[in-house]
Amino acid sequence: MGPASNEPQRIAGLPVPDPCLSFWQQTTRSHPILHSNQDAPVPAEAEFVIIGSGLSGALTTFELVAAGVPPSDIVIFEAREAASGATSRNAGHVRPDAFRGFQMYEQLHGREQALKVIANEKLVFEKVGEFVREHGVPCDFNPTTTFDVCMTPEFADFNAQSLARYRAAGGDVSHVRFYAGDAAREATRVAGAVAAYEWPAGSVHPARLAQWLLARSLDRGVRLFTHCPATGLAESQTAAAAAGGKRWEVATPRGTTAAAAVVHCTNAFAPHLVPALARFVTPNRAQAHAFVPPPALSATGRLRSTMSLRHSLKHFYSVAQRAADGIVILGAPIANPRASPEAQAARLVPDDSFVSAEVRDDTLAHFAACFPACDPARLRLGEGLLHAWAGIVAMTPDSVPLVGPVPGRDGQWICAGFNGHGMARIFTCAPGVAKLILGGTWEDTGLPECFQMTEERLERAKAGS
Ligand SMILES: Cc1cc2nc3c(=O)[nH]c(=O)nc-3n(C[C@H](O)[C@H](O)[C@H](O)COP(=O)(O)OP(=O)(O)OC[C@H]3O[C@@H](n4cnc5c(N)ncnc54)[C@H](O)[C@@H]3O)c2cc1C
């Protein structure tokens, strides 16, 4: 039997309409905005159309309103329920890179930009904390420290080299602490740790953060249309548009909206409406897991710092134990270099409706190897895996996001391509794009120049590939 005729259909290049639910979504099912305007037709006109209601879209909207844009001028189109993309599916880490990526950024973008990329992440962590405190956002934000736990001598060497290069280039490492051997195992409690680095970072309930931002904007008069994918985008040919300046027609299954400004906050799905990004932004599946800890990791035994358990640059697991309820969130890329050919192939399938049993089992086994009290044989009924879910991250070949005007498409803007690391980037990128939309200069954004979407950047990637 085929699907019922009223079931949403899958459209190639857009998020699947039937995603699995994450732990973050499971714990916010009563939020009133989840299905805002889900059956309503879209307006014929709007000054601003924001496409995508994840953290990028939610914060860009919030910033536009904060800067004085009338809320009734803004509409948000979201393909699924509110904030149901990577934002509500991630591992909850707000974890700036303190130095590890420096070598790679330096190779890709030069020394000055690499320094700016790392400094920007530190700033984001500070900004998230300031914002949450200033507005009293109930999103379980937990500022603490994080460990980069080196699980192999090779990765310990790599990290040592990264830190040395970053420091030699003038990077600030005054907030980074180093532990070797026994000291690393004692500080992190990770059996098998070879070395560890510690610096300030935090965790958050990411869905609550995005939902709060959206709800605040909706209260003020912004209109959010959920289950409403933007399926097409074309320059308006009407006489009114010609007279009043360029307009873009955003097509959806519930009508077309002509807008003066369109902001692409669609992360991995940006290429659908911006074809120039077709080989630049690549969707990759990632997976996260919620785990109920045994007594050794409960109460005062809770892990107070988050961590990344690292075997190599591409083989790692993240761990963040929530202060609010003790649930441990375990993150993993869908295919580490040891994964089976099937798992490797599934990595590029842009579908978050299912989880990989292989990744789940590997993540749990690895966690138990690091924390033997979490061995399944020792767990009681009710402890252990609570839930597993998948999400889609947006990779770019030069490892940095796309922010600012879309070249050759006057009136279109982008804030996307976060390389699985948006929680440590969006809190400067979205305010930056809002500033640019309102006439600010790149300098006003304070962002690294390499984040700009330029034709030259796309060409360079093509040549490189
Ligand atoms: C399993 C997993 C773990 C992660 N862990 C971390 C972590 O610990 N720390 C970290 O920093 N980052 C992490 N990330 C990455 C982080 O979640 C993202 O970088 C960030 O959420 C991106 O936010 P966004 O708003 O740009 O994109 P999204 O949250 O993906 O939002 C884009 C929205 O656009 C909608 N959309 C797309 N196309 C259309 C269209 N045509 N019309 C209408 N709507 C559309 C989507 O439905 C979606 O809601 C993780 C991601 C995953 C999947």
Image (tube, rainbow, N blue to C red):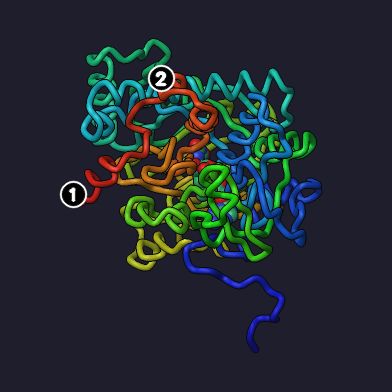
Query: Measured from the top left, where is residue 434 in percent x and y?
Result: 54, 30
Q: Residue furthest bottom?
A: 1
Q: Is residue 38 left or right of residue 391?
A: right
Circle 1 crowding by C-alpha within 10 Å: few under 14, some 14–19, many from 20: few
**Residue for point 36% across, 39% down:** 453
Looking at the image, residue 343 sits to the left or right of residue 232; the answer is left
Q: Amino acid at mark 1?
A: Ala
Q: Is residue 25 above or below residue 136?
A: below
The kind of residue tagged 2 is Glu
**165 lies above or below 90:** above
Up-down relation of residue 241 to residue 228 (above or below): above
Which residue: 47% across, 63% down?
Answer: 13
- Residue 75's disc is none
Q: How many marks?
A: 2
Is 97 in front, or is 370? 97
Is residue 182 something that shows in the picture? Answer: no
Is any part of residue 363 visible from this angle? yes
x, y (%) of residue 130?
A: 62, 18
Q: Nearer the viewer, mark 2 or mark 1?
A: 2
- Please provide percent x and percent y for residue 27: 73, 47
Assess mark 1: CB under 8 A from ligand 1? no
Q: Which residue is label 1 attached to?
A: 463
Pinpoint residue 253: horizontal percent, then vertical percent.
Answer: 64, 66
For image coordinates 23% across by 23% down, the residue present is 111
Q: Is residue 460 left or right of residue 136?
A: left
* Secondary structure state at the residue bearing disc 1: helix
Compare marks 2 and 1 and give the one earlier in the sequence. 2
Give the distance between the C-alpha atoms of the residues marked 2 and 1, in whole angstroms.
28 Å
Residue picked out by circle 2: 443
